[in-house]
Image (spheres, rainbow, N blue to C red):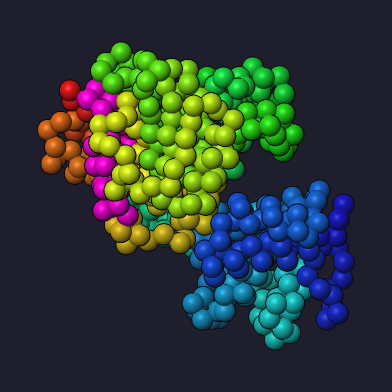
Amino acid sequence: MSSAETGTARSGRGRRADPARRAAFDVLSAVAERDAYANLLLPALLRERGLTGRDAALATELTHGVLRAQGGYDAIIAICSDRDLDRVDQPLRQVLRLGAHQLLATRIGAHAAVATSVDLARDVAGQRPAGFVNAVLRRVATRDLESWLEIAVPARDRDLVGHLSVRYSHPRWIVTALSEALGDDPADGLAETEAVLAADGERPQVNLCAVPGRAGQQELVASGATAARWSPFGAYLAEGDPGRIAAVAEGRAAVQDEASQLAALALARAGAGGPGAGGTGAAVWLDTCAGPGGKARLLAGLAQDHGARLLAADLRLHRARLSRGAIGGTAGTGVVVADGTAPAWQPGAFARVLADVPCSGLGALRRRAEVRWRRSPGDVAALGPLQCALLAAALDSAAPGGVVAYVTCSPHLAETRDVVTGVLAGRDDVLVLDAPGTLPEVPGLRCPDPHGAFAQFWPHRHGTDAIFLALLQRRG
């Protein structure tokens, strides 16, 4: 067992922070200071520093554990500190959060958790701040997590939203947005909202997706994965590196959330047999915001199964290149750099159009916990005009009888139902299709909205990201 995990080495002025804790600190600092994504930066940093085995596992647990529970830890640290948290320098905040996580959510001994945190504080800020960290964490160590939360969390009957916000470590505005999307009743204690918040704190399993025509679900199962509940292309990987599976290593399968897979499948199924449905080899499908290529990879295989071809487009060159790499092994595909709001193609040219628009990412808080701390209601509002423009252009790009899938990885009403209903209010050439009806095998998709035709995946119901789907057919 490594000293990084046990923290058994004695603390002292000459001792440096251990590599695992320093790696976690550096990732958390990058997330706070330059909007880095932990799930992208941490693996690269572990490789760069040669951290493997238990050291890598500890760095991963500390990083993601702090990001998931940061709000609750901050409330506890505020009680234990003689300074307002806003007056504590950012590096020391990260050290305190790392220490609190070790004390309250791991099996690391209290002495080791405090001593290694002091070492880290000394390493990044000096001797005097290290004393402050020592004093605060010794106070944190006097109670367990539940005891602290009883003190730090607002009473449920006095401030229900505040109670859920602190207990489940989500900003208040996100708690409110989730309850509105669910149509949850405060009289019931926002029970389903609480279930979503709890699910956001759980570590998601790895979802794999086989590319139709290049790999199959059974190949993934034979490689050690478990068949997905609903996606015929999907499989769950309980542990291990996905890259060890041959189909993944060869680009014939990839990591992709099951709801993302099912959104692409719904588009392929919708309106089958109608005008422009893509039943002939002449039909072309479009992915208008393709980068980095996850859905485009699957959609290319589905198009090929339907005798159609796929054109993948993205505004940014590097994202278009990522899309090309993702779908490069599928015949009959093309990739272009193009603005989805000002199409470079003729209107009415496509049998299927996927508009997987840029969004806040609030639907992926299990995988990207830091998003909850870096987004604001203003960010969501700012995305609205772009999302509306992309959907309107996607509808114009669809042939008569063709189908458009509007998809976001967010359940926020301003990014989902409001966008669709707002765009449709100015048009009479669009039919709203029954999105849940295209996926009858998946329960609990229907939204509490006036159309009753939109689909919303949820982590607590489906074990997936909270992805929204609307299917719209261009009238002939």
Residue 379 visible (yes or no): yes
Q: Where is residue 84 shown, x and y percent of the image? A: 50, 79
Residue at x-position 43% and y-position 17%: 307
Q: Is residue 34 above or below residue 443?
A: below
> Where does the magenta region start and end?
383-407
Q: Nearer the viewer, residue 402 or 414?
A: 402
Q: Where is residue 55 shown, x and y percent of the image? A: 79, 54
Q: Is residue 396 magenta?
A: yes
Residue at x-position 66% and y-position 66%: 26
Q: Is residue 363 magenta?
A: no
Q: Nearer the viewer, residue 427 or 141?
A: 427
Q: In the shown orientation, is residue 189 left or right of residue 290?
A: left
The residue lying furthest to the bottom in this view is: 128
Q: Nearer the viewer, residue 239 or 262?
A: 262
Q: Is residue 21 above or below residue 357?
A: below
Q: Nearer the viewer, residue 327 or 199?
A: 327
Residue at x-position 36% and y-position 22%: 283
Helix, strand or loop: magenta stretch: helix
Residue at x-position 31% and y-position 19%: 277
Q: Where is residue 348 shown, x and y percent of the image? A: 25, 31
